[in-house]
Amino acid sequence: MRAEKRPMPQRRTLLVALPALLAGCAGGGGAEPEPLPPLVSGYRHLTPIRLNVATVEIPEPPATAVRVDLPAPLRPDAEMRRMAEERLVPMGTAGQARFLIQTAEFRRESTGGGGGLFGGGPGIRFAVRMQARLEIVSGEGQRVGFVEAQATRQRTLPGGQSEAARNSAAEEVVRQAMEELNVEFEFQIRRALRAWLVEGAAPPPVGAPGGIEREELPRS
């Protein structure tokens, strides 16, 4: 008797695999984005800003200066304080430097409409705004100089993004704003408060400097 050959159930295998493929497309259209590395690893790897003052004060910002729409993977106010704590180093015997957080905002705003092949709700915009001020106060309590720096960044995502993608974009926009603020802050200090900078590790002689240098910007 000849054995009857049965066809392989290829059609059934295809029908089982197809729903899995569609489910993968509906879940976000690809692999999850790789997580970003931590925001800098602090600021201690950068050249410290040594100031001819006895202390550095970082008061708590007023409530009106801070707005953080949760969830926020990184808080601008916390990162601004961290930058000041790790970069500003007192090297003098009198006077004080005051780092003031004037604005620290992280906003999450809906852009309306859906997006993506399978929809997914409205898009989202992340907006960051930062402004900081450094004041130099003499030993007699008089403000003898100051600088300000600010930074803004924003990022918009279409609808249908995963929570991981939104968190990654939110962290990245704060990261970029902090990098800009850090660079601008140091530039302004070295330009307008040069007389209060201490080069090297040794403290300056008692009584120096006597005032603030002013540098005229070039005229076009």
Image: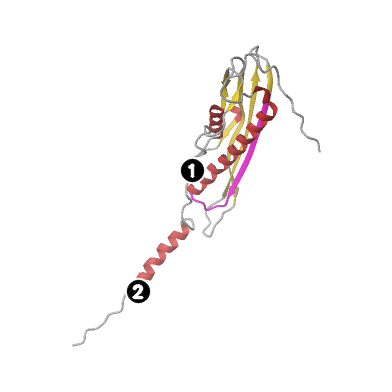
> 214 or 2: which is nearer to us?
214
The residue pinned by badge 1 equals: 37
Residue 60 point in image, percent of width and height: 56, 24
Which residue lies at the image location 53% right of the left edge and 60% below the top edge?
A: 117
> 42 or 118: which is nearer to us?
42
Identify the mark at residue 10; answer none if there is no mark. Answer: 2
Q: How far separated are the C-alphas under marks 1 and 2? A: 45 Å
The answer to whether residue 58 of the structure is visible from this angle is no
Judging from the image, what secondary structure is the residue with disc 2 in? Answer: helix
Judging from the image, what secondary structure is the residue with disc 1 in? Answer: loop
Q: Left or right: where does residue 145 sit relative to residue 15? A: right
Span shown in magenta: 146-162
Q: How is the image coloured?
A: secondary structure
> 27 or 87: which is nearer to us?
87
Q: Quadrant of residue 77?
A: top right
Q: In which quarter of the image is residue 4?
A: bottom left
Residue 160 point in image, percent of width and height: 52, 53
**Nearest to N terminus: mark 1 or mark 2:** 2
Which residue lies at the image location 62% right of the left edge and 38% below the top edge?
A: 180
Q: How crowded is mark 1: few (under 14 residues within 10 Å), some or many (20 or more)?
A: few
Would you say the magenta stretch is mainly helix, strand or loop?
strand
Residue 210 point in image, percent of width and height: 69, 16
